[in-house]
Image (spheres, rainbow, N blue to C red):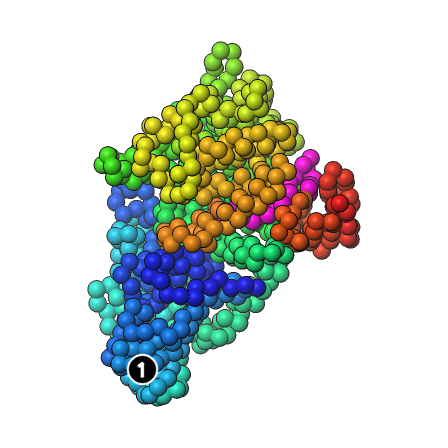
Amino acid sequence: MKKLDENRFDLRYINKFASLMTVGNGYFGLRASHEENYVGQTRGMYVAGIYNKATANEPSDLVNLPDMVGMNIELDGEYFSLITGEILSYQRQLNLENGELRRDIVWKNGAGSRFRLTFQRLAAKNDLHVLATKLTVTSLDKPAQMKIVTGIDAQQTNYGRQHLIEEKVRVAEGDLLQGIYKTTESGQTIALAACCTCSANGGIAHTAKNRQLLSAIKHDLPADAPFVLEKIGVIYTSLDGDLREQSPEEASEAALRSFSAAGYDALLHESAAEWAQFWKEKRIKVSSTRDFDQLALDFSVYQLEVMTPAHDERFSVGAKGLTGEGYKGHVFWDTEIFIIPFHLFTEPEKARKLLRYRYLKLKQALGKAASNGYEGALFPWESAFTGEEETPEFAAINIKTGKRQKVASALAEHHIVADIAYTVVKYYQNTLDDTFMKKEGLELLKETSRFWISRAEEEQGQLVIKDVIGPDEYTEHVDNNAFTNYMAWYNVKQALFFMDKYGDDDGQLKNRGHEFLKRLYLPKANDDKIIPQDDTFLSKPEIDLSRYKLAQGSQGILMDYSRQEVNEMQILKQADVVMLLYLLPDLFPRDILSKNLDYYEEHTIHDSSLSKAIHAIVAARAGDIDKSYQFFQESCLIDLGPNPHSSDEGLHAASLGAIWMAAMFGFANVSIKNQRLNLDPRLPSEWSELTFPLIFQGTRLHIAITHEQAVITKVAGDDLYIELKGNVFLVSNIVEVDLG
Ligand code: BGC
């Protein structure tokens, strides 16, 4: 398997690579900041679910925890830094196969002495609390004096906002550093403990000052003999479900003792074994003329794994996973529409847990609906730990006008309600999990339906949904956004279906639901076969967007036009009608797909990372594989491309999910039709084979697709009927289908 490489130290990329090379395990994520300090470097370590409000009126932040990997290394009286001395060789690799990050450097200090330094680190996959690091230093030319200072540094903030009270720091039994911190508002305790073990030791001294608990290790390096420092850390919090009556403080101390005794290599070995199993069950493989495609898919799957807090259903996935502070770690529709699909088709239990997250926050969603004058459940546009609305009231300041721009999403981006309901249905179709569906699923469907029924209003003899924001956030406060109306319709339709299925006797809701379905206005395609994005969109003026498309992702248009001006033109930030065509394919014939794709693509800047891959899927389904492959490739560059700052504040979690989706739902064209798995594959000419594992209705399949043939193998579970290119096959062993 390919590794993600950085072959050159370049300060401009320091934060991008810190995000890209994050190590993590769903419990915590650790940015790949360098051990040594650089101006502008943003360190970050985050534990899923640990949020805090810095002041009462601010939304919650995913808290940036004290740093445990920073090191000051002095070699013959000179600080090791890649901006002084000379770099003789530099190589950093995130090994996607075993989750280890490794940096190999040969560095010459100002006095001309050469040193080899190797840094290794991992977030254990087999024990979620463990962070293990190892440093190997060799003086290559002559004996040298070395001093390393490292520990637990609580000077970290979320871009200046300090969330932690330092409650207690101590050094136990001469070598165990422990810091206990409490979040200022949410009241969560975080216990961090770390212990350094050296291959040889000239002396160790500890200090605690200015929120830094540090060990200073001195050693005289002989020439050409490696010195090894292993630092094993553990993280526990008061939210942990596995504390077993212990406090985080007690748990961290006990755990650290056993893990530091094991040592780095043993921890790597055990963690790597879990990763090996993971790849065996989840890797999607492509034989492509472009190696980068496989790297992008492996990278996406790796990140989807490390961003998902599968250990605890009270947490979900933030828009940047656990890789940075962008969007404050908040949870959006990204989770249901872009991240859950990967889990649903590879480990449905994780999809269930992520849906349980929403179920556990139903009370808050009912509260939000009520306080806005609606019935049922109105889920927050941005959510964190409590389930209350977390969307900031204002976005960044427009530096031209000096005015803060209001964020209207909390008030009007209501499609999230239907997105959650949609995924509940997909979960059921994939798993046939009646236990979940009868209880959590049905309640979610009923309450979301109640919301839509109360949200719609009467106008000229039909029901309309006014004043919303659809997925395209450049078009605000519009009436009858097609995406929203169709998704609301689907939401209510499915609620009625499952109410009937399970004999739910809420007659009033049923009557209201049927009435809603009959009377809701669903925008139809016009004479040119274009589905209007909303009531007014198609009558707005158009401008040439080519210059903004060239700088897509930067939202440069907002520098030239105010939001209000953008709102009054045919300009899309991201897929909207195209998103609808992707989610509800059965409602729209193929020619509608291509017409709308062409029309809306021309008007879409793709300033959101959630856009391109959806265009890729719809292009593939419309039969335009070249265009689809072009979109796919461009999606892969959102995080992995050359822009040095694209991912400074964290990776685009949804876009990573969408890369996987583009291969699966675009080229393999996997969908669920009539409760049955359906495939209609067509590979790009650059690909000769696509293979992937897939779980459907409890049966584990392996699927291999070439231009000529599809081979479906049952790996485990019951026989399964599938549909391929319009024909139905029973998979009880191996099915080979000619695609020619
Ligand atoms: C997009 C939203 C998305 C959010 C978080 C915004 O820029 O417009 O669709 O949910 O980012 O990723």
- Is residue 674 covered in magenta? yes
Residue type (three-letter) at the residue carrying disc 1: Ser
Position of the N terminus, as image quadrant, is bottom right
Q: Return the residue found at the far top.
A: 460
- Is residue 588 covered in magenta? no
| Stretch in magenta | 656-680
Q: Is residue 154 above or below residue 400?
A: below
Q: Is residue 347 above or below residue 223?
A: above
Q: Residue at x 74, y 49 (%)?
A: 709
Q: Is residue 305 toward the left or the right of residue 385 in the image? A: right
In this view, the residue in front, 137 or 681, is 681
Mark 1 residue element? loop
* Residue 117: percent from left, percent from top: 38, 76
Q: Is residue 685 above or below residue 380?
A: below
Residues packed near mark 1 inside 10 Å, few (<14), some (14 to 19) or many (20 plus): some
In this view, the residue in front, 153 or 498, is 153
Tell me if the residue at label 1 has its CB under 8 Å from ligand 1: no
Residue 721, quarter of picture:
top right
Q: Which residue is mark 1?
A: 113
Q: Residue at x 41, y 32 (%)?
A: 544
Q: Residue at x 63, y 45 (%)?
A: 667
Position of the C terminus, as image quadrant, is top right
Residue 402, quarter of picture:
top left
* Residue 275: percent from left, percent from top: 55, 63
* Residue 69: percent from left, percent from top: 35, 67
Question: Can the viewer see residue 480?
Answer: yes
Residue 68, quarter of picture:
bottom left
